Amino acid sequence: MNTSYIELSYVQVACAALLVLVNGAISAALGLGMQKHWLLAVVRTVVQLTLVGFVLEWVFREERWYVVLVMMIVMTLIAAQTAGSRSERRYPGIYRNTILSVWISAWVTAAYGLLVILQSEGSWHQPQYAIPLLGMILGNTLNGISLGLNTFTDSLVRQQDEVEVLLALGATRWEAAHGPTQHAVRTGLIPVMNSMMVVGIVSLPGMMTGQLLSGTAPLQAVKYQIVIMFLIASATALGTVGIVLLTYRQLFNKDHQFLHERLK
Amino acid sequence: MPLSHDESLLDACNISRRLENGPSWLLHAVSCRLWPGDRVAVTGPSGGGKTVLLRALVWLDPFNTGHLLWKGAPLLGRDTPSFRRQVIYLHQQPVLLDGTVEHNLRQPYSLQMHSDTQYDRQRTITRLEQMGRQADFLDLPTRTLSGGESQIVAVLRAVQLEPVVLLLDEPTAALDEHGTRAVEQTVLGWQAENPAQRAFVWVSHDAQQARRVAIRFWHIDQGHLKERSSEP
């Protein structure tokens, strides 16, 4: 491992925590009443990341395929749960659908990344690659899926009359749902498209920054980042299309009826 | 009523419907039969099930019990789009897409079911003139239309597709006397083009209108449908 980076001590981390005092001070001065929330946010950041740090230390040390697998499953389920719970409108089967679309899209892409692109030496279950790769894919897919899902159900509710008029004029269920479907998939993919457009110019992605800090040669870090961007783009597309189609199947039946009562 | 043959057009058989976990029945074991050439008016109190009945007759919502027969044969799910091409339901509130009037009139022809027919501009203008509008009405954006004008566009959009059955949910609710007559004439005109075959079901609040347009009268209250010999 490359050790050409500065090892951080807890004192140094505490120095960084001082910065958040500014946030608290602003809140107090302007009477925003956010001091408590800031304190909670600071504590959560420290606690959650430290816990993850211990877990990761352990997983990296063990290097057992089943430990890595369990970790990946837990990450996937949490991502799916988050994606589903952000939706303002729900319908029966929403969690099954988010789990399916998160799982399939993220794992297919991660498998492609690990096995075909990285050809990670020996096996797919090296935690050093498998976990951050899947984590980044999940984090982004999750956004696409929850945006796509939210947009789809929302426009179906708002355009219920339009959808029904189309059905009443002889449209198939697919034709009737076409507008909201397109709109939802497009909306779900906008963030990824945007970040690909400006990557490196406006923002330096977190992973690349991390690699640079830990001493990786910039061009290597860039190559990794490009690979990751493409993995994210394809996983988000798969996941967004997946959730929209699964939702569509749940809300439009074979008799070409729009089951709007299922949307709550 | 003159029956050229004894085949019915549309049969509702014992249809019941209620909302998921809903307490009361929106439709309660409703059976009715529409013959070719029928002109039916539906009356009844608000919330009595008039709209639910029309929606049921095009199978827009799933039934709790019962089924539809189209020309004597049970309607299958995969045939719904072609069935709804022949039986068109008009919403009570006219729903138009963004864009011009003409865009709305052309739109149905982009659907798979109507791909074998084409929008006929000349025919549309003729119909518009019968309804007291000029050709430039076609270029108006639908956002600027009044409620009554929207109603006219919705009726026109359905009639031009030459359905066999029209299900009209208070199509003149937003219109003045003049507009009301224009819509009535348009629908009656469409029916008169093939009077032995084409039929409509017309929901109306107005007993006079019911008598003007219809020869059969249905009354629906609390989800129960009754046929009346005349509209009182």
Image (cartoon, rainbow, N blue to C red):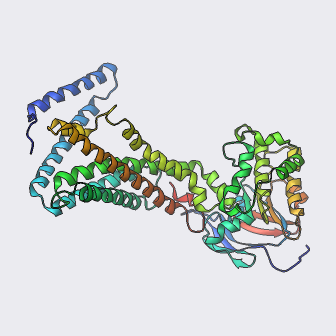
Q: Quadrant of the C terminus of chain B?
A: bottom right
Q: Quadrant of the N terminus of chain B?
A: bottom right
- Image location (x, y in percent) of residue A95: 39, 59
Total residue callouts: 0
Residue lying at the far front of the rendered structure? A219
Please state if A206 lies on the left or on the right of B202 as rendered. left
B33 and A184: which is toward the camera: A184
Q: Is residue B210 at least partly visible in the picture?
A: no
**Relative to B45, does residue A198 appear above or below in the rendering?**
above
A45 and A247: which is toward the camera: A247
- Image location (x, y in percent) of residue A133: 25, 51
- Image location (x, y in percent) of residue B75: 67, 74
**Relative to B6, does residue A255 appear above or below in the rendering?**
above
Q: Is residue B106 at least partly visible in the picture?
A: yes
Occupied quadrant, residue B164? bottom right
Question: Measuring 29% from the left and 58% from the top, which residue is drawn there?
Answer: A112
Please state if A201 lies on the left or on the right of A214 as rendered. right
Question: Measuring 24% from the left and 23% from the top, which residue is drawn there?
Answer: A22
Question: Measuring 19% from the left and 43% from the top, which residue is drawn there?
Answer: A49
Occupied quadrant, residue B22? bottom right
Residue lying at the far bottom of the rendered structure? B6
- Image location (x, y in percent) of residue A72: 24, 57
A152 and B34: which is toward the camera: A152
**Relative to B149, does residue A39 appear above or below in the rendering?**
above
Please state if B166 lies on the left or on the right of A4 as rendered. right
